[in-house]
Image (tube, rainbow, N blue to C red):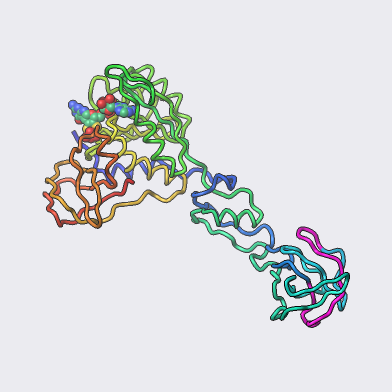
Amino acid sequence: MSLLPVEEALTRILALGTPLPVEPAPLAACLGRTLAADVAAARVQPAADLSAMDGYAIRFAELPGPWTLAGESTPGRLPDRALAPGEAMRIFTGAPLPAGADTVVVQEEIEAEGTAVRLTGEGPPRPGAHVRPAGSDFAAAAPLLTAGTRLGPAHLALAAMGGHGTLPVRRRARVALLSTGNELVPVGAPTHGLDLPASNAPMLAALLAPHAADAEDRGIVPDRLAPLARAFEEAAGADVLVTTGGASVGDHDLVRPALVQAGAAIDFWRIAMKPGKPLMAGMLDGAIVLGLPGNPVSAFVTARLFLLPLVARMTGEPAPASTRPMTLAAPLPATGIRAEYLRGRTEGDRVAPLSGQDSAGLATLAQADVLIVRPRHAPAARPGDVVDVLPIA
Ligand SMILES: Nc1nc2c(c(=O)[nH]1)N[C@H]1C(S)=C(S)[C@@H](COP(=O)(O)OP(=O)(O)OC[C@H]3O[C@@H](n4cnc5c(N)ncnc54)[C@H](O)[C@@H]3O)O[C@H]1N2
Ligand code: MOO
């Protein structure tokens, strides 16, 4: 039995995925997304010289006054007249300066009685004081955001102020999840006897969520060829079809034959890793198919290693964190023909494997914050040796 090395499996899976089209998405849907094209301002900000304070618009050269009151300026509309010599206009924060004015005196330094406006304080220190000049935030067509920016709240606000209600990002990936197995029952349903909650679907949906991928749970399919093939045909409209279970060599492991019956082209099956050996990849009617093992930990590890980088490539999002070196706090045995991904827990700058590495053990998975990556044919490792770890929490 030949098992594909992990690196080659990843290369072949990534080769199946092409970046999804760039489309305008509403700002509310863009938080955390990666901008797919440069964005320029569609307007000038501020659109005119605006007051930064509540007070009086004057000519700086006419200080220290006094002035005659000449109407008022409020935000959102231009004053209906210019400032004549010797005049001051009442003005509010965010309101445009009348033509002829160049400075604002704050109202705390003014005494106004009827139309007489008098300076009571020191007055503005320089021409242009308390004025936000037109275009001082950004000019028309100014570059606002560059492609590749991970969009945060401030970027979204800047885009909105720049006149944009949408931003160009790659379309989110639609990932159909199919759980296979006669023993499975929906999550949260009462279990009788040997019923098993289909825990892989919520786990995979949660893994996918930060990577701009929407999981569509297509439910549970029994281990029978015809219903499996039918479910695969129906799910093929998704960008990626992910199955869990039925991927191994048992008599009830029918995912591969059912995929073939549905018309899928299988790229590879079975890889040199533990857990995760029965991984399968292929194409079905334009959808990429990943057949993950049913064991919950095997499904988690293969999704982390192969599914997440695939959707990140398709959606234009950064690939999930890669490995980093760390010092081992406990010994590890030599590995064989499969690379091993052990649930580990870090403490300070050291990492230790958790006890109990069975592929079905979710309690251990929930305690782990990294996978300790051990290459194939690695010699035994001792405390103090450096190993690669992959963050999972
Ligand atoms: N003779 C051999 N037996 C097995 C081999 C092998 O090479 N030769 N490989 C083993 C390895 S490695 C793995 S991993 C498992 C995976 O097999 P399958 O992908 O066919 O998974 P199932 O048999 O359907 O299920 C395994 C296990 O996981 C439970 N399960 C299935 N689906 C879910 C789900 N959606 N949520 C939670 N748990 C699920 C299922 O009940 C089983 O207990 O095969 C070994 N066998
Ligand atoms: O490769 Mo399996 O995933 O060890 O249990």
The magenta stretch spans residue 137: no
Ligand 2 placement by image quarter? top left
x then y, percent, for residue 377: 14, 46
Image quadrant assignment for residue 268: top left
- Residue 295 or residue 109, whichever sits in front: 109
Image quadrant assignment for residue 252: top left
Q: How many marks?
A: 0
Q: Can residue 245 be spotted in the picture? A: no
Image quadrant assignment for residue 365: top left
Which region of the structure is painted magenta? 57-78
Q: Is residue 311 above or below residue 103?
A: above
Q: Is residue 307 left or right of residue 235?
A: left
- Residue 356 or residue 69, whichever sits in front: 69
Q: Residue at x 63, y 53 (%)?
A: 160
Q: Is residue 113 left or right of residue 10?
A: right
The magenta stretch spans residue 72: yes
- Residue 121 or residue 303, whichever sits in front: 121
Q: Residue at x 14, y 49 (%)?
A: 378
x then y, percent, for residue 347: 24, 53
Q: Can residue 138 be spotted in the picture? A: yes
Q: Quadrant of the N terminus?
A: top left
x then y, percent, for residue 13: 35, 41
x then y, percent, for residue 56: 78, 71
Q: Is residue 288 left or right of residue 61?
A: left
Q: Is residue 371 above or below residue 110?
A: above
- Residue 362 or residue 51, whichever sits in front: 51
